[in-house]
Amino acid sequence: MNNQATRLSGHSRILYLGPFLSMFDRFSIAPLLLPIAHDLRVTVAQVTVVATAYFLLYGAMQVVYGLISDRIGRVLLLRLTCVGAALAGLVSAFAPNLPVLIAGRALTGCVICAIIPTSVVYVADSFPFEVRQRAIADLLAAVGLGTAAATFSAGLLAHYLSWRVAFLLPALAALGLAYALRWLPETLSRQPTRESAIRQLAGLARRPWLVFLTLFAVPEGAAMLGFFTFLAPTLEAHGQNPAVAGIVTGFYGIAVLAGTQVVKRIAPVVGAHWLIVSGGAALTLCYAVAALSPTVPGILGASFLAGTGYAVMHSTFQTWATEVAPQARGIGTALFVSAVFLGGGLATAGVGGLAGAGNYALLFWWGVAVTAPTVAVGAVARRRFRGQPADSDGVTATA
């Protein structure tokens, strides 16, 4: 592949299945909160712990997998965590009560969390920085498809079959993916690091942009992932069934898919800080619309705006995270993703009480209050950052 190529080819395209599966598993939970509460005879606030536990473990384990990725390679890590996700998914699907379900989802988040950041690192290993965001956009297209598939189908499965099927299907798919990834070529071509984890993390702590981006990712994750979880429950609380709520919020995935294609075309000519501003404006508007109009048209528009924000703004931050520590890209990227999901989990937990009380309008105004300043800080910081025009670690396009 030459340096101007921006898309994986050959057996490397198997990689796209991982983010699809991960996002299907991640986004299936939102339309399922009320059906699970009804089936297990618990409150919505109690079921929210299922999502919170998933997010927090998803975030907490990123650093561990980043260290492992730089030692054993990207492909082996992907295959092992797919097996783990399959086993934990089966626990979730057959959970007899809420505590077992919480444990199953926490374990699922604990292992499936390795898939997307490791896939991003795989792409970063394969493409130089000047074309990397366009390459990552293709990866995020798979994210969009997985998100759309989850939000469209999870509500339908819960309404016509059982919420358990929405956990069973990705568990079975993860087993198949673990086998299929045997054909994925490894990209960690250099000698795996022998440096201790403590020394590696201490070295990264001396990189000011990495420290900033990791800390900044907490509110960015809250804005991007935490409040969005409640779009589907908002519709259900206003009388819509899970199938309708899932279909409506599924437009998030369509927006991610469309937005990634736009980013591929405009990223080479538009400053990264303007991508953050425009995507962040869409996300802020999303929560304002959801607060003012908790109807099918309102939540559909909010979902589309949130997906646009993910594709345009969040992809810019993800690309930035791959460049701030190129010699330790696995752990550097993992720190960012860990903080994103930590923020998402904290936001979900923080506003769970508002959801339980049915006060979704105030919940989404909190989303506006968190998102707007986060976007402003992120845009200013990205404008000040001056990265290398090409990888300083000699990465070439080999995928």
Image (cartoon, rainbow, N blue to C red):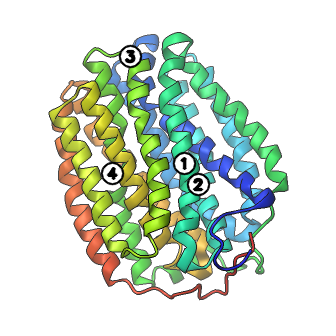
Residue on which disc 2 sits? 116
Tell us which disc is closer to us: 4 or 3: 4
Numbered label tally:
4
Q: Which residue is mark 3?
A: 42
Residue 3 showing in the rendered view: yes
Q: Position of residue 307 (x, y in %)?
A: 39, 47
- Looking at marks 1 and 2 on the same chain, the residue that comes earlier in the sequence is marked by 2
Specify few, some or many for label 2: CA neighbours under 10 Å numbering under 14, 14-19, or 20 or more. Answer: many
Q: Which residue is mark 4?
A: 222
Nearer to us: label 2 or label 3 = 2
Kindly identify the amino acid type of the residue bearing the numbered disc 2: Ile
Measured in 3D between alpha carbons, the distance from the residue under mark 2 to the one under mark 4, in whole angstroms, is 18 Å
Which numbered disc flags the more N-terminal residue, 2 or 3? Answer: 3
Q: Secondary structure at mark 3?
A: loop
The residue under label 1 is which amino acid type?
Val
Q: Are marks 1 and 2 in contact (CB under 8 Å)?
A: yes
Query: Tag 1 or tag 4, which sits nearer the N-term?
Result: 1
Q: Position of residue 221 (x, y in %)?
A: 37, 54
Disc 4 secondary structure class: helix
- Binning the other alpha carbons within 10 Å of mark 1 as few (below 14), some (14 to 19) or many (20 upward) gives many
**Callout 3, which amino acid?**
Val
- Name the mark nearer the viewer: 3 or 1: 1
Image-based side of 116 in relation to 181, left or right: left
Q: Where does the image place residue 388, in percent across and percent down from the top left?
A: 50, 88
Judged from the image, the secondary structure of the residue bearing numbered disc 2 is: helix
Label 2 or label 4, whichever lies nearer to me, is 2
Residue for badge 1:
143
> What whole-number distance in Å separates the C-alpha atoms at marks 4 and 1?
19 Å
Instruction: Identify which residue is drawn at 42% across, 31% down.
Output: 30
Q: Measure the alpha-carbon separation of dots 3 and 1.
A: 31 Å
Identity of the residue drawn at 45% across and 24% down: 32
Label 1 to label 2: alpha-carbon separation: 9 Å
